[in-house]
Amino acid sequence: MNTLVLLSDLVFKSNDKLDQRILRLFNSEQPSIGYIPSCSDLERKYFEHTKRYYNLVGIDNIQYYDLDLEYEESTFGSIFECDAIHLSGGNTFYFLSLLQKRNVLGLLRSYVKSGGILIGVSAGSILTTPTIEIAGFGEDADENNVGLNDIKALGLVDFEIAPHWDGSEDTLNSLREYTRVNRTAVYVCQDGGGLVMDGESIELYGHVRFLDYRESGSGHE
């Protein structure tokens, strides 16, 4: 029974229903979240932004765990004691290369299957899917500067996700072609929206569209 939160971006006070739903996923009165950046955040700029978001939601215990320049193998394992793990946004190819390098993919799968909550934002949400191929698709694609060949991701869901949807029909048509070519299904999300998976159910928040090569697109507004 996987518990996942897949967000396009962290937007303050944009969707109170989504914020409160995230809070209700936690059984602890003082929940803890382990934060993994997509690359070293030496000045903690993005970490502090994320921390402020969770503080506003009502979660105070946010801990930083680096897989890149500040990686500490001896202490990283304690992240799996947290109630939730947050995978940040950034370059999806670089992030996946770090997860591979540090042998964390299998550990994250086990963590989720054991009841841990996984929260992915932008690149982090893409990493929960079977492949990060969609990160390299479109005009605003991530650059594969690390020359990553193995783009298989966590595979915790059987669909893909396209964050930062601009709301245009042109983008949807482009992604419809992507689903057809790759024989896949994609949730397309605008910033401020996302998905919550609690067991078998998928709940949609904000502006989200579902595209499946087998059927016409449906949506949630």
Image (tube, rainbow, N blue to C red):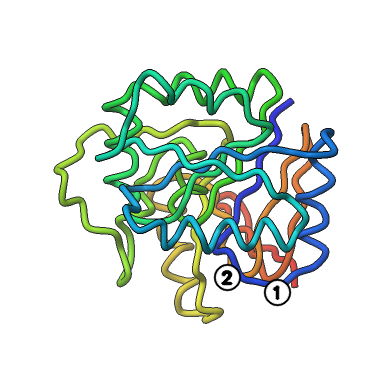
Q: Residue at x 35, y 49 (%)?
A: 92
Q: State the residue in front, 108 or 179.
A: 108
Which amino acid type is marked by label 2?
A: Asp
Q: Are marks 2 and 1 in contact (CB under 8 Å)?
A: yes
Real-space Cα distance between discs 2 and 1?
9 Å
Q: Residue, x 34% and y 35% (percent of image)?
A: 67
Residue 189, position in %: x, y?
Answer: 58, 64
Quarter of image, res 199? top right
Q: Which residue is mark 1?
A: 14
Sort mark 2 into few (<14), some (14-19) or many (20+) by Cα contacts within 10 Å: many
Badge 1 marks a residue whose secondary structure is loop
For mark 2, what is the residue? 191
Residue at image location 52% in from the left, 53% down from the top = 161
* Left-right relation of 109 to 93: right
Image height of 67 relative to 203, above or below: above
In this view, the mark in front (2 or 1): 1
Quadrant of the image occupied by residue 44: bottom left
Q: Nearer the viewer, residue 55 or 10?
A: 55
